[in-house]
Image: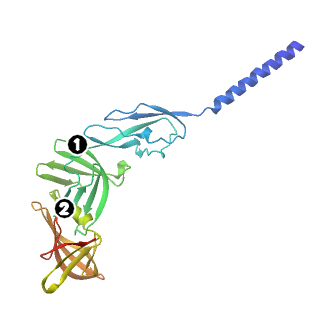
Amino acid sequence: MLKKLFLSMMAIAVMGFGFVACSDDDDDPTKYTVTYTSDHGTAPAAISVEEGTALTESQLSSITADGYVFLGWYDGTTKAVADTYKVTKDVTLTAKWSAALPSSLVGKAFFDSTNGVGFAVLDETQYAWIHSNAYNTSVTQKYYIAEKTSDTEYSLTAYTDDTFAEEAGTVYTVKVTDSGISLSFTNAQHASQAGTEYAMTHVFSSLFRKTYSATVGNNYTVSIKIIDDSNCTYGGNAYTYTIPEVTADNTAKTLTYKMQWYKDGVASRTHTVLITDSGITFDNVELTEASE
């Protein structure tokens, strides 16, 4: 009898130990594997992380490849952002790349004065897109992915932001030649025209919030301050303006604007403004920068 009681107690103890052991196993954190893959450069080795872990900057570090710009790690169309992207399953992160545009294009702007369109290359992955039928200055900054299709031609896909969601893109073709750049627009309202390089940075950034003036006959001072891309002051009075006509001189690197000014919404005077690398000529009077 005692022997049976002892054996029963031992069995219960063993079962209890088994339950405890199973309970310990259930408390072990779930882990998932993060695998990296890339068409260029060398992808990092796979890592194992606990469920719900937000990947760190070092776990999403950049890699390099000659002739390409690294844009980030992506889970499908979702960009994995450090300290935000959390692992909830086994996942493969894919490196996204853009072909590196020639460094000679960075910081330069190109314009088709016939159709009033163009773009300025800001850096290796961004450009400012300029578009207006009447050239009523509209500037939109976009990101792009460039694919090199030949020795002198790149196909650019434009995106609204740096998530590079596939459905957000619009394809433009940029052809680089010895004489400059040409744009081929897939949008039907724009004709394919050779691009004209000009000092767009002066028009859309460095001229803003600065006053230019000159003293002419009878000690009369001509002054103009460009406030932003559609407002200015002339002689202390505030005006808005449109630019119905613009002429680019690719050799001299100048732009000539026909400015239609409006006072309180009513069309006022029209002036011709010449933009150069060194400043502004306002109706044949050369203005110099007066103050910030």
- The local secondary structure at tag 1 comes to strand
Quadrant of the rendered image containing residue 210: bottom left
- The image shows residue 9, relative to residue 125, as above or below, that is above
Please indicate whether residue 143 sits to the left or right of residue 152 in the image: right
Quadrant of the rendered image containing residue 244: bottom left
Q: Quadrant of the C terminus?
A: bottom left
Considering every residue shown, the one lying at the far bottom of the view is 218
Mark 1 crowdedness (10 Å alpha carbons): few <14, some 14-19, many ≥20: some
Residue 199: mark in rendering: 2
CB under 8 Å between callouts 1 and 2? no
Mark 2 crowdedness (10 Å alpha carbons): few <14, some 14-19, many ≥20: many
Cα–Cα gap, marks 1 and 2? 26 Å
Q: Quadrant of the N terminus?
A: top right
| Residue 223 drawn at (x, y percent) | 21, 78
Q: Hey, what amino acid is under mark 1?
A: Lys
- The image shows residue 240, relative to residue 206, as above or below, that is below
Judge whether residue 165 can be spotted in this image.
yes
